[in-house]
Image (cartoon, rainbow, N blue to C red):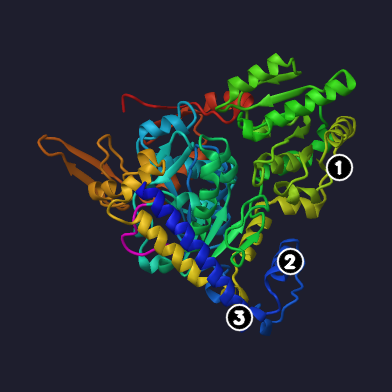
Amino acid sequence: VRTSLIIYSWFIAFVLSSIATNASTKSNPISNINKVIDPWRNLWENTVNGKKESPYSKEDGSEIVPESDIRDPNRRIWIITTACLPWMTGTSINPLLRAAYLAQDRPVGKVTLFVPWLSKNDQEHAFPPNIRFNTPEEQKLYVYKWLSEDAHMPEAANKLDIRFYSGRYHDEYHSIFPMGDLSDLIPDNEADVCVLEEPEHLNWYRAPFTSKAWLDKFNHVVGIIHTNYLVYTRSISGGAFKEPLLYYINQGMCRAYCHKIIKLSGALQEFAPEKEVISNVHGVRTKYLEIGDRSTLRGFTKGAYFVGKLAWPKGLGELFQLMNYIRKRTGHCFHVDIYGQGPHMNEIKDFAGKNKLPVSFHGAKDHSLLTEYKVFVNPSISEVLCTTIVEALAMGKWVICPKHPSNEFFEQFPNCLTYTTNDEFAANLYWALNHDPLPLSKALRYTLTWEAATERFLQASIMTKSEQLLAKKSMDKFWTWALEMFLGGKNSDMMRLLAGAKGAANQIEYVKKYGSALPAVDEEGFPALSENEEILVEKTGEAKIISYEYKSNASVKKEAIDSSSSSDNNADSIVKNDVIVNEDDISNSNEEDKSTNNINTDEKS
């Protein structure tokens, strides 16, 4: 009851604060900057679309705030995200590639990627079968090796700094949450620019700040919103009550902890209109574009397919409904091959079987191996920006998707056919099945690259004087205070537990026990110290010493790059830090399912 009263009192205070702020803005002469909000949105859209003309002169407020311009290669950038390879999810791959493309043109060590370290038990839930790590250094080696070999970026792998924080996997949300104060792990003299990938997610159950909050610590903080959590909230128990509450909590998190907010598409909620901009700051890996370059000569031998997580929010229910509609209208229906795994896999298979739909299920498979298909079908409207659509367009395929804010970026591509009705879907689909896709133009091909995405990110991160003047600082301060009251008090662990944090609730207890958010590396949960230091933990009551030595980033990168370029024909496998990678097994599995590597822990070592 007390928790409910606190939450609703904050909500009432928020509404009153909003009214007061809006009233002050109307009476403030600063608000007469040419009714700036809507035209300014248009300005950013024009910039993202490649139109460089600005309707504002510098006298009208378009001058850039120096702290927000991160093009200078000497800026110190920290990118913090909520997932890490080998979990092949968008919040692990996209931040990694963003960090790599920023790092490759900058001096060594200017860009750091901060990722979660999971215990062995949590790795069982998040990582593919047979890929497990005993220490953060083993996982770091895996990431550098992937960046060098799969992403073909050895130079970036040599320059990028990767560090770990302690994380906990939440089985209900299928997400990772930080343990301990992340900002405290970053030295003040290196705290220049911070990119929070999913700022709301990173801060929902955060530990109390032990030194400084994000905006106090960094000169410029950019939040990138990846996921539409409101859609997922609707599908869980009590979603009707939780969704409006989450809407305002997300707003508060972004207001309190970000100078600039980048939304990947217009499908997301409003966070802070004067701070936010819509821009697709993601790209696609080169290998997908190279597949598309060869698609015209190779041709296609199969029709329609779907690839993605087998969960109802991913649009499979809508796909089956459309297939039923076409069958009722025409007496027959097209066939779809479905690739993927997920929490609703059995339900989806049962539904398709009961309705006798012409679908085949093939399990998980790397999208880049599905080169023979011509038409990618994705009816989902729960996405913010669908990664598989980007990949399909890069591979030279037709894409059939609904006309929706999440798909606006893709409408500029001739091979993207959007629909608003069942009949339009059917017309688009059968047209695509009977016609060849158009080759990508050079301009559109570049639009999909990570080089273009990085340029869009640099532009979208900028804050102008006008935006700075329009910032509702009183609202931001209110949310900073409210969230600190909720998450920073001595009883905040109980508040987090009531809010559904589960294993991520005991933040204060964790900090008292381990002292920081550095990852624990042994079975007893002892935390690792800084790099190049040797951890010697003497267990009380036992004549036993646990020794763990961190390797420097340089040595780990060298091992990853050396192993990728090694040509020793006598070696059947690469052994690194108790991890055995059997290359024959990898080459065989790549033909069937490149997403699963045969990596096992050597029990004897």
Where is mark 3, residue-wise?
A: 27
Q: Nearer the viewer, residue 28 or 369?
A: 28
Residue 112: say if magenta: no
Nearer the observer: mark 3 or 2; the answer is 3
Where is mark 1, residue-wise?
A: 438
Asked if disc 3 and disc 2 are in contact, CB closer than 8 Å, the reply is: no
Percent x, y of residue 143: 48, 43
Asked if disc 3 and disc 1 are in contact, CB closer than 8 Å, the reply is: no
> Which circle's residue, 3 or 2, is located before the other in the chain?
3
Name the residue: 79% across, 25% down.
323
The amino acid type of the residue labelled 1 equals Leu
Q: Quadrant of residue 239?
A: top right
Range of the magenta residues? 207-214
Name the residue: 49% across, 26% down.
598
Where is mark 2, residue-wise?
A: 42
| Location of residue 444 with respect to 85 vertically, above or below | below
Q: Is residue 486 left or right of residue 401?
A: left
> Which circle's residue, 3 or 1, is located before the other in the chain?
3
